[in-house]
Image (tube, helix red, strand yellow):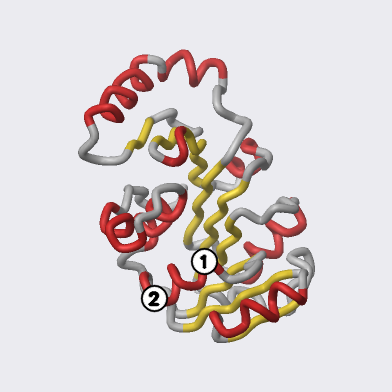
Amino acid sequence: MTNFNLSYDGEYTHVFHSPGIEPWITGALKGRKLKKVIDVGCGFGLASVVFKSYLGAEYLVGLDVDDAKVSKASPLYDEVVVADARFMPFRDHVFDLALSLEVLHGLDIKSLDEVERISNGVVLALPRFNVEELLRRNYKVYRYLLRGFVLVDLHSYEALTMPDSRLFRVVKFLLTILKPLMKALKAFRKGYLLAFKYEIHSR
């Protein structure tokens, strides 16, 4: 299983005032030495600020199939590439981390194969994907609930919540009570997902 230790990054919310997927992703990545990172489906480059300035990625590549978006995003990246995620023009294992965050057209199996081919770690945030396929590939997969204030691990059905909030401690308690039922029913398999995998390849 992957060695991502997921936690909610409260420091991120103080800096950027942005609850949602970003504090969970930065919580998983803080402290990692990210030399070369690719943002697959970069769009206009909104993720670049987080990964370049906040997490300190040394070299950040943006990739998107839409050349107009890539053109606008180019000042935010060290390098930009117009390409289809299913056929990326990179050598195997060249990136420390590949991100694919909120790619609206969706990620397919061919794209996931390519993302894994070029990188040693993957972070996905997407509205739908085959959960069983991600679990089979040893991803840590979380269902994103209540606008990201709650995540449910779709392997163990442990609930993660924002810290220091009485309301969400109650939510976590209720989800803990319901865990055997949720696990038996394979609940929360459809909807918005966060998935993490690291050390895909040994160098």
Q: Is residue 155 left or right of residue 119?
A: left
Give the residue displayed 55% in from the left and 81% down from the top. Answer: 77
In the image, which disc is placed on residue 101?
none
How many numbered marks does the figure carry? Answer: 2
Mark 1 or mark 2: which comes first in sequence?
1
Where disc 1 sits, the SS reads helix
* Percent coordinates x, y for residue 172 in the rendering: 32, 26
Give the residue displayed 67% in from the left and 73% down from the top. Answer: 63
Classify 161 as above or below 167. Answer: below
Residue occupied by mark 2:
53
| Residues packed near mark 1 inside 10 Å, few (<14), some (14 to 19) or many (20 plus) | some
Classify 127 as above or below 155. Answer: below
Q: Is residue 107 left or right of residue 138?
A: right
- The quadrant holding residue 38 is bottom right
Q: Nearer the viewer, residue 94 or 47?
A: 47
In the image, which disc is placed on residue 47?
1
Classify 114 as above or below 174. Answer: below
Q: Nearer the viewer, residue 192 or 46?
A: 46
Give the residue displayed 44% in from the left and 76% down from the top. Answer: 52
- Residue 53 in view (yes/no): yes
* Percent coordinates x, y for residue 101 in the rendering: 58, 57
* Percent coordinates x, y for residue 125 in the rendering: 56, 51
Badge 1 amino acid:
Ala
Q: Nearer the viewer, residue 40 or 131?
A: 40
Where disc 2 sits, the SS reads helix
| Residues packed near mark 2 inside 10 Å, few (<14), some (14 to 19) or many (20 plus) | few
Residue contact at pointers 1 and 2, CB within 8 angstroms: no
Give the residue displayed 70% in from the left and 72% down from the top. Answer: 69
Badge 2 amino acid:
Ser
